[in-house]
Image (cartoon, helix red, strand yellow):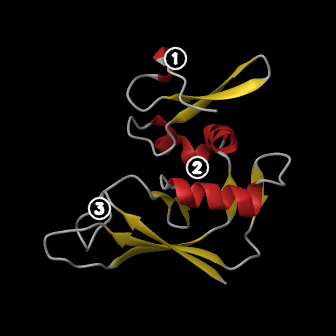
């Protein structure tokens, strides 16, 4: 069993999740896109590096994430959510899956969507566009690799 502890810095209230990550898709599914670079790098190294399609099904493994609230005036740390990891995806793969699966429609249409990167392709290379602040059709700022 592997358990990853994730401090949800945007959630200061030790009794509630006050941000869009993790995003509750429905009663059984949470979309979690970690912004912590080290965690993303470790997931890539451990699970995605050898994946030919940017996706690794880990539902048969015991992998969990525990979310703790961020720092606050009361100096309290509490578990604010727990989730079992089912799949580990690249941003590109997550975008394609979530934009084509109706369960994620509400999440994808939100201005503050936790999946705020959209892949574009140029000469066979993939770039990720930041689509967090404007309509997708207006974005042209390349942030990716």
* Residue at image location 78% in from the left, 16% down from the top: 123
> From the viewer's perspective, is 33 left or right of 13?
right
Residue 97 placement (x, y as % from top left)? 68, 43
Of residue 117 and residue 86, the one placed in the foreground of this image is 117
**Mark 3–mark 2 distance (CA, rounded to whole Å):** 25 Å
Give the quadrant of the C terminus.
Answer: top right
Let me know if residue 127 appears in the view: yes
Name which of mark 2 and mark 1 comes first in the sequence.
Answer: 2
Q: In this view, does 2 lie to the left or right of 27?
A: right
Distance from disc 3 to disc 1, alpha carbons, whole Å, reads 30 Å
Q: Quadrant of residue 105?
A: top right
Q: Which mark is residue 81?
A: none
Assign a secondary structure to mark 3. Answer: loop
- Mark 2 surroundings within 10 Å by alpha-carbon count, few (fewer than 14), some (14 through 19), many (20 or more): few
Q: Position of residue 106 (x, y in %)?
A: 47, 43
Residue visible at 73% across and 64% down in the picture = 46
Q: CA gap, disc 2 to disc 1?
A: 27 Å
Q: Which SS class for mark 2?
A: helix
Res 76 → quadrant? bottom left
Q: Residue at label 2?
A: 103
Describe residue 80's horizontal placement relative to residue 125 as left or right.
left
Crowd class of label 3 (few under 14; some 14 to 19; many from 20; radius 10 Å)? many
Image quarter (top left, top right, bottom left or bottom right) of the N terminus: bottom right
- Residue beneath label 1, please? 140
Q: Where does the image place residue 24, in percent across and percent down from the top left?
A: 46, 59
Task: Choose between 74 and 60: the one closer to the eye.
Answer: 74
Asked whether the residues under the numbered discs 2 and 1 touch, taking CB atoms below 8 Å apart as contact, a structural biologist would say no
Q: Sequence-wise, which precedes: disc 3 or disc 1?
A: 3
Tell which tag, 3 or 2, sits nearer the viewer: 3
Q: Position of residue 20 (x, y in %)?
A: 39, 52
Q: Mark 3 points at which residue?
A: 11
């Amino acid at each position: 069993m592997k358990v990853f502890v994730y401090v949800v810095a945007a959630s200061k209230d030790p009794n509630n999740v006050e941000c869009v990550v993790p995003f509750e898709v429905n009663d059984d599914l949470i979309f979690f896109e970690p912004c912590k670079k080290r965690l993303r790098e470790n997931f890539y190294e451990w699970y995605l590096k050898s994946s030919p399609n940017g996706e690794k099904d880990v539902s048969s493994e015991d992998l969990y994430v525990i979310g703790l609230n961020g720092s606050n005036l009361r100096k309290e740390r509490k578990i604010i959510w727990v989730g079992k990891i089912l799949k580990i995806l690249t941003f590109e793969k997550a975008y394609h899956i979530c934009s084509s699966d109706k369960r994620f429609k509400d999440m994808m249409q939100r201005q503050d969507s936790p999946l705020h990167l959209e892949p574009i392709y140029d000469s066979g290379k993939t770039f990720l566009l930041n689509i967090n602040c404007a309509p997708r059709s207006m974005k042209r700022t390349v942030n990716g690799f």
